[in-house]
Amino acid sequence: MANEEPAPVTAPAAAAPAGGDHSPAFSFSIWPPTQRTRDAVVRRLVETLAGDTILCKRYGAVPAADAEPAARAIEAEAFDAVAAAGGAAASVEEGIEALQSYSKEVSRRLLDFVKSRSADAKADPPSAEALAPDAPEAQPAA
């Protein structure tokens, strides 16, 4: 009898409350996202800003030291924008809409950030001193 498989364990069925109310034993909320989710968004933004991405190839990578503060600011601004625009969700559908708005805000702000950073880099070309060689060149005798 060593080859017998154990019987599957099943939870007893919950009795329905009187009156036919079938409310769930648990509830979940899509909006606002948990801090864990928001931290995951920040980590992904850092990877996008400082990694080998199409965005970095087009607009330039952000140094790692600057990527995390920028990512935190982008995420916080996007979250605050959606919350200020009535991001409180009374239903799952409204939570989904708020989460979609949050995602769009994060993407829009990320793109705005890399574009403005790229424009700033093009507007501030290196000075002549920065381009000059380290050692002075010998002047030919006239």
Image: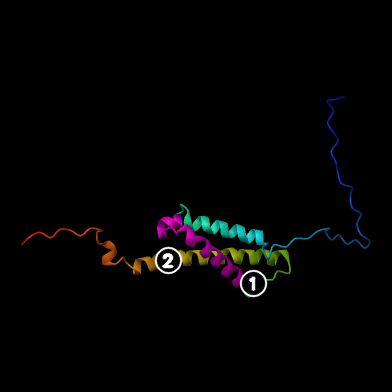
Asked if residue 62 is positioned above or below residue 86 in the image, the reply reads above
- The segment highlighted magenta reads 54-83
- Look at the image and say whether residue 62 sits in the magenta stretch: yes
Label 1 sits on a secondary structure element that is helix
Q: Mark 2: few, some, or many residues within 10 Å (few <14, many ≥20)?
A: some
Q: Position of residue 103 (x, y in %)?
A: 58, 63
Q: Where residue 132 sits in the image (x, y, percent)?
A: 25, 62
Q: Residue under circle 2?
A: 117
Amino acid at the residue labelled 2: Arg
Which quadrant does the N terminus fall into? top right
Looking at this view, is 51 or 14 the one in front? Answer: 51
Query: Which three-letter amino acid code belongs to the residue tagged 1?
Result: Ala
Residue 50: x and y in percent read: 47, 56
Image quarter of the C terminus? bottom left
Position above or below: 140 against 73: above
Residue at point 94% right, 61% down? 18
Q: State the SS at label 2.
A: helix
Pick whichever, 135 or 88, lies toward us: 135
Residue at x 78%, y 60% (from the top left corner):
27
Q: Determine whether, in the image, residue 14 is placed left or right of residue 60.
A: right
Position of 96 with respect to 73 (left or right) is right
User: Dot 1, how many residues are within 10 Å of its Cα: few (below 14), some (14-19), or many (20+)?
Assistant: some
Magenta: predominant secondary structure element? helix
**Sequence order check: which comes first, mark 1 or mark 2?**
1
Asked if the residue at tag 2 contacts the one at tag 1, i.e. Cβ–Cβ closer than 8 Å, the answer is no
Q: Quadrant of residue 138?
A: bottom left
Residue ID at (45%, 64%): 114
Find residue 8 and report its horizontal and vertical position in percent: 84, 38
Q: Mark 1 highlights which residue? A: 83
Q: Nearer the viewer, residue 61 or 136?
A: 136
